[in-house]
Amino acid sequence: MPKTPRRHQDDLATLFSLAFSTLNQELHQRLVELGFDDIRPMHGFLFQGLIPDGATAKTLVELLGISKQAVSQMLDYLEERGYVIRRPHPSDGRGKLVVLTERGWALIKAKESIYMNIENRWGGIIGPNHLNTMRSDLKQIIQFVGEEDLPQKLRPVW
Amino acid sequence: MPKTPRRHQDDLATLFSLAFSTLNQELHQRLVELGFDDIRPMHGFLFQGLIPDGATAKTLVELLGISKQAVSQMLDYLEERGYVIRRPHPSDGRGKLVVLTERGWALIKAKESIYMNIENRWGGIIGPNHLNTMRSDLKQIIQFVGEEDLPQKLRPVW
DNA sequence: AAAAATTGGTCAGTTTAGTTGACTTCTATT
DNA sequence: AATAGAAGTCAACTAAACTGACCAATTTTT
């Protein structure tokens, strides 16, 4: 009896999920090698919200689509480890402005360089044109769906 | 001062994540409408492992990339709710064979029909050719990476 | 200008979904 | 027959989200 190992399906949901997982595994593996061993996948989405001039927790809540308490906990974690600092908000006494520290910026740079490397390699597999087409197709779909279904929150994770 | 709402980035990781999230939100929203209100996203990957003739927990562990105890808990959950049953394994007294019930199959059919509908709509946005190209490009990349980095586990979530 | 409602954020406790460790039963290897 | 390995479960723990209650500052209403 031939051993036919169970293969993953090829519906889009599975493909997106595996592609994302692949990217993230390599990213975080390399970040660990560079000394960023305390960063979890979800943090990446938060960091993007802080570029370039920081953000309030409120903004991050909207971006991530999670509760404000969850965001606050993530910020505690990242502040303890020196990636961000919370400063009083310049114009709103209730709020705080979260900004990147030097270490936070170093992480961003490292992330960008790693992604660039991966995308180049992927371009080698399917060709740069296909990769660019994929990117713009995905952007189109996400934009379309985002406009169509305003009520539902579009969050980076499920 | 113009209100410039924070937009998502367009690196591939973000795009994959948003695309996946979009698919999953619509899928689960519709499943709830059809009465499948107790299914969580991760369950989908498990169900795929049960098509067509069931599987052992061991196989599911390899497919999902999580601990066997976690798989066992998921199976408890799904068995309680009538989606699967655990039968003694026909040839290995230690093992059990997990198979889909009628309700389990009904869920699979519903899922397939919903995905087909979504993919058709997406084909309308970027064109069917682009959608097919995207699918085959993703398959190529995942296959390539999977062969290259054998040690690391390729799991459907992070 | 005072009162009321809203907003940004935190504190505390809970839930969900995974983890590890210890164990039982059955199988495979000597 | 003895022992090592594999499939699966039980129990306890952890990570990361959640909800509810609350405080302080701001904005709106009267």
Image (cartoon, coloured by chain):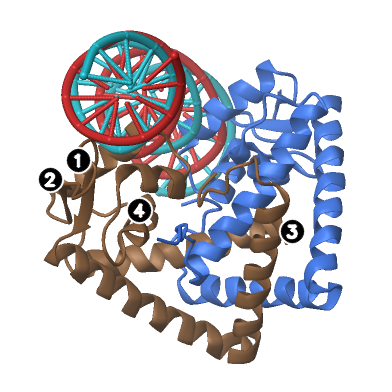
Chain colours: A brown, B blue, C cyan, D red
Please state which amino acid type lies under the numbered disc 3. Answer: Asp
**Residue at the (26%, 75%) spot, across then down:** A109
Indicate the chain on which mark 4 is placed: A
**Residue at the (63%, 41%) spot, across then down:** A152
Residue placed most toward the observer, A109 or D23: D23
Please state which amino acid type lies under the numbered disc 1. Answer: Asp
Instruction: From the image, state whether disc 3 or disc 1 is nearer to you.
Output: 1
Q: Provide the residue designation for mark 2.
A: A80
> Can the viewer see residue A6 in this picture?
no
Q: Provide the residue designation for mark 4.
A: A46
Is disc 3 placed on a helix, strand or loop? Answer: loop
Q: Looking at the picture, do discs 2 and 4 lie on one chain?
A: yes
Q: Earlier in the sequence, mark 4 or mark 3?
A: 3
Q: Is residue B112 above or below residue A29?
A: above
Instruction: From the image, state whether disc 4 or disc 3 is nearer to you.
Output: 4
Indicate the chain on which mark 1 is placed: A
